[in-house]
Structures are given as C-alpha cells and as structure tokens.
Amino acid sequence: MPARAQATAPTAETANSETRAARRKPAAPWTSWLPWCDRQGRFSALRLAAFLLTLLPALLILHAAWMQQLGSKPWTEGIHRTGTWAVRLLILSLAISPLRRLFDWGKLIGVRRMLGLSVMAYALGHLALYCIDMAFDWGLIVSEIVKRFYLTIGFVAVLGLVALGVTSTDGMIRRLGKNWQRLHNLVYPITIISLLHFALQSKVDVTEPVLMSGLFLLLLFYRGLFRWKLKPSLPRLLAIAVLAGLATALLEAGWYAAASGVAPWLVFQANADILTDWDVALLRPAHWVALAGIAVALIFSVRRRDAAGAATPPRVRPA
C-alpha cells in the first residue's frame, strides 16, 4: 500500500519559504481555491497540467473497469494499479525540490502540495480497494496486515502519508513551526518502506520497483549535492547520473540474488547487453535511471547557458 501525502521533504530554504507564505494572511480571492489557480487566484498552466496529471491515472483505471479490462480479478488489478500510481506520483513529487533548484524554476514548488495530496489519495484508494476485495472482513483484514510483512509496512506507509497529508495545510504549517519540517522529513523513510512494499508484492518481476528505487536514489544524490553545498555543474550531474545507474544495477542484482537465488553476474550481463546490441528493448532500470540523470544534466547545461547569454549585454559595434 505505497504512497504518501505531502510531496517532498523540504530543504531548510524551501520549508522557511513555505512557512512565511503560510503566515501571510492576504485576502485571497475565491478562485485561489481552484486547483488550476495560484494563491492570488490567477490561472496557472503549470497547476492545471499537474492537476490533470493527478486525475489521469484514476480516469484510466475507471475506464478500464468500465470496459471490463481489469482481467479475471478486477479488484486485485485495481489494487495493484492504484498502488503503482501512488509510487510513481510519490517519486515525481520528491523530484520537485531538486528540479526547482537545478533549473531555477521557482513556480514548480507551487504544485508540490497538489502532487503530495494526490499520492495520499491513491494510497487511500489502494487501501480501500484492498478492504473491498476482502469483503470488509475486518478481522481477516487486520490479521493479514499483522501476519504479512509486506502488508504491515504498506499499512505503516499509508498511515505516515495520511499524517503528512493532514499537516500539509497552511494552518498546520503555522501551528507546527519548525516541527513541520521535522515531520515532513519522514517522507524519505516512508518512501523507502513504500518501495519495499512495492517490490515485495510484485514477487517475480520487480522491474518497475527497481526503476522507481533507482530514480529515488538519483534524487537522493541531488539532495546530497545541495546538502554538501556543491555547485551544480554538467560534469557533476553526469557523474551523478552514472553513479545512480550503477547503484540501480547493484540494487537489482542484489534483490534477485536474495529473493530468487539468481546469480548477480547474470543481472550485470543483462545490463551490459545493451552496450553491444543497442536494442532499446534490452534497456534495464539502471539504463533508464542513467538516461534520466543525463537528461537532467543536459537541460541544466542548456538553461545555464541561456541564462548566461541573457545576462551578457550585447556588444555595440563602433561606428
């Protein structure tokens, strides 16, 4: 039952900015409550895109259910799909803060709360569908959660995400003060147990759990870059991309070795085959993580170059 409520654990800078924003009490227009408007009630294309993104998975699941495309066990398939989307949105929400800083895109922070609350919604939907599938037999539900480790940690993750969700309002930010940041830093351990739950319930094929875990490692590397106050640069970001890819390959090999007894070298060989065959179908989670990191590095380089060009005054040729 993976997911979470508040999007990403803030840095001190981000948390302070959110706390200051929450303490202001402007007479906001009623349109500021609309998900596609900012705090001043103005339309925001970015917020609208984020809102539609959070709705799309639910619409796809409902359409598949309506068209009877969820297989012979529709409730079970619905459980899996809501959980998978909860994890995807969780990783996306965690990416907001580092991408905002790398790309110098301040407006990104405005959609973080929306993404975080959508994660909580999909997690609760994940849990609700599980209860429906168990015919609301509360005795059986409780016993299963207690007896099965992957259900236990999934339930703990949902509780944690609900706690983050209900404390994500401006009022709770004001009440909790500095404790708000400490509480929302728990998003990282919550993400870890959510990913573990995802992998355990996936059983044989853990391709997507490994991919999500690799992207999470990539985000942690970015977080370390800022924590150590290292200036982002193209070489450093490319190095992070390679390290995250290697870490993902090690994670995948270790998982299969521990869970299935597969020799680690076979997993490494599968990761190396792309270097000789150049077949996109052979791309493993480690490759996708490395490519994601490389894409971020290239976008960062382009934006920095454009910013430097805009800051340089044009030369005036002598008459």
Image (spheres, grey):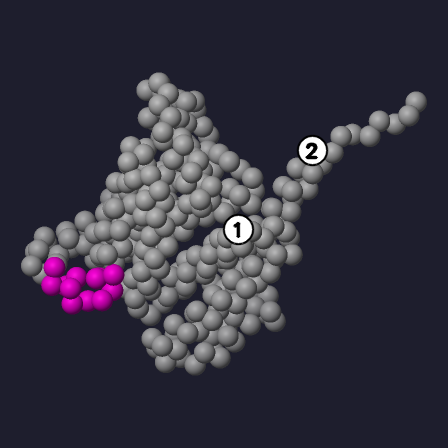
Q: Check disc 1: other Cα within 10 Å, few if <14, some if 14-19, many if 20+.
A: some
Mark toward the viewer: 2 or 1:
1
**What's the residue type where badge 2 is placed?**
Ala
Magenta region includes residue 225: no
Magenta stretch prevailing secondary structure: helix
**What's the residue type where badge 1 is placed?**
Phe
Q: Check disc 2: other Cα within 10 Å, few if <14, some if 14-19, many if 20+.
A: few
Of the 4 image quadrants, the one containing the C terminus is top right
The residue that disc 1 covers is 226
Q: Quadrant of residue 25?
A: top left
Residue 308, x across and y down, in percent:
69, 38
6 relative position to 306: left or right: left
Question: Which residue is farthest front?
Answer: 178
258 or 167: nearer the viewer: 167
Whether residue 202 is visible: no
The residue at 43%/69% (across/down) is 251
Residues at circles 2 and 1 in contact by the CB criterion of under 8 Å: no
148 relative position to 24: left or right: left
Whether residue 260 is visible: yes
16 or 132: nearer the viewer: 16
* Sequence-first tag of 2 and 1: 1
The residue at 37%/66% (across/down) is 206
The residue at 39%/78% (across/down) is 257
Residue 124, x across and y down, in percent:
23, 47
The residue that disc 2 covers is 310
Residue range of the region highlighted in magenta in the rendering? 142-153
The residue at 34%/48% (across/down) is 182
